[in-house]
């Protein structure tokens, strides 16, 4: 969901960095406007495809042919740094994508009732088409069509390299009120080509076969807007509460403490997705996709 107060809800972010033939992609929260520097971290929005690949490039792989398949570059795409020390996140530098606006998501959370939060209120909804259908993400959730942002690129493995790993964090403003509801933010890291049998999603909750989403990793209790949608409440050890209430109902009032400098109420631990048995020298297509499930018209949430 986005944290705008006009139409939709919060988004997501992720970073990408390669290390000795292993690709590390970290999901972090959204970023600030171009050139903006805070005491917490440094952010820039509207990055070119070349700048994004430069931020992600590392030894052991070659990245090329980047495409922003869907999304608004000035508001939904950027890079960041100093997130470990500056925001208490678990990924320090990288690339960020958001289903909302990256310009307002990296602000303090707060204690005012949802959706105001008392911190930086995200009031910008992502421009562009209202819906976008991607078959890989809609195969997981058919309703996953709102504020979609898709960034893809080629990854060619150097000789001797057979593994891709993705390191990331996922966060959302839907926590905790929409756990157990149809409004289930979700994303995927889809890898194809290079001789792979079809497309594989490596954004999976560790120790499970569940895609990472609000309804699959959370604080372990149903939100006040639970509507009997299927959920998993057993992965709370892999979740970080950024100041929200610890039970529901009533709906969240964000009493604190706020352990990360981000607008989002909840963030996962740093996860690592792995794809092994790959062929050195082969080229694989990596698609990074984020989406939200539309809320009623009077709600909107920011990016994550």
Image (cartoon, helix red, strand yellow):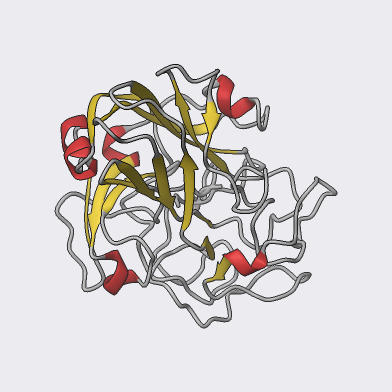
Position in image of residue 11 (x %, y %)? 48, 47
Q: Hey, which quadrant is residue 60 in on the image?
A: top left
Between 133 and 72, the residue placed more toward the observer is 133
Please indicate whether residue 133 sits to the left or right of residue 23 in the image.
right
Q: Which residue is rendered at x = 71% and y = 68% of the image?
A: 251
Q: Which residue is rendered at x = 54% and y = 42% of the image?
A: 8
Does 261 appear above or below 104? below
Please indicate whether residue 156 sits to the left or right of residue 262 in the image.
left
Q: Residue 47, can we see it?
A: no
Position in image of residue 289 (x %, y %)? 46, 34
Does 249 appear above or below 186? below
Q: Residue 247, can we see it?
A: yes
Between 246 and 7, the residue placed more toward the observer is 246
Please indicate whether residue 105 sits to the left or right of residue 43 in the image.
right
Position in image of residue 229 (x %, y %)? 80, 45
Does 265 appear above or below 161? below
Q: Hey, which quadrant is residue 127 in on the image?
A: top left
Position in image of residue 239 (x %, y %)? 58, 65
Q: Which residue is rendered at x = 23% and y = 51% of the image?
A: 33
């Amino acid at each position: 969901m986005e944290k705008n107060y006009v139409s939709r809800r919060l988004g997501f972010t992720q970073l990408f960095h390669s290390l000795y033939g292993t690709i590390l992609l970290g999901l972090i929260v959204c970023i600030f406007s171009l050139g903006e520097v805070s005491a917490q971290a440094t952010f820039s929005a509207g990055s070119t495809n070349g700048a994004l690949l430069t931020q992600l490039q590392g030894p052991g792989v070659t990245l090329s042919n980047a495409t922003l398949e869907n999304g608004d570059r000035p508001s939904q795409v950027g890079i960041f740094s100093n997130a470990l020390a500056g925001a208490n996140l678990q990924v320090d530098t990288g690339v960020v994508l958001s289903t909302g606006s990256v310009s307002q998501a990296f602000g303090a959370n707060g204690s005012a009732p949802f959706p105001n939060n008392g911190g930086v209120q995200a009031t910008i909804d992502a421009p562009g088409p209202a819906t976008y259908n991607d078959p890989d993400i809609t195969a997981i959730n058919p309703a996953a069509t709102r504020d979609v942002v898709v960034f893809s690129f080629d990854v060619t493995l150097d000789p001797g390299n057979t593994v891709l790993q993705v390191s990331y964090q996922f966060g959302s403003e839907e926590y905790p009120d929409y756990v157990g509801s149809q409004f289930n933010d979700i994303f995927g890291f889809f890898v194809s080509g290079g001789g792979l049998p079809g497309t594989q999603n490596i954004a999976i909750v560790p120790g499970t076969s569940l895609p990472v989403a609000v309804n699959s990793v959370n604080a372990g209790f149903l939100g006040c807007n639970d509507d009997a949608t299927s959920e998993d409440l057993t992965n709370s050890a892999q979740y970080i509460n950024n100041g929200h209430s610890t039970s529901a109902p009533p709906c969240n009032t964000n009493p604190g403490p706020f352990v990360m400098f981000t607008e989002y109420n909840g963030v996962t631990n740093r996860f690592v997705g792995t794809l092994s048995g790959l062929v050195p020298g082969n080229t694989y297509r990596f698609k990074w996709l984020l989406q939200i499930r539309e809320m009623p018209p009077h709600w909107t949430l920011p990016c994550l």
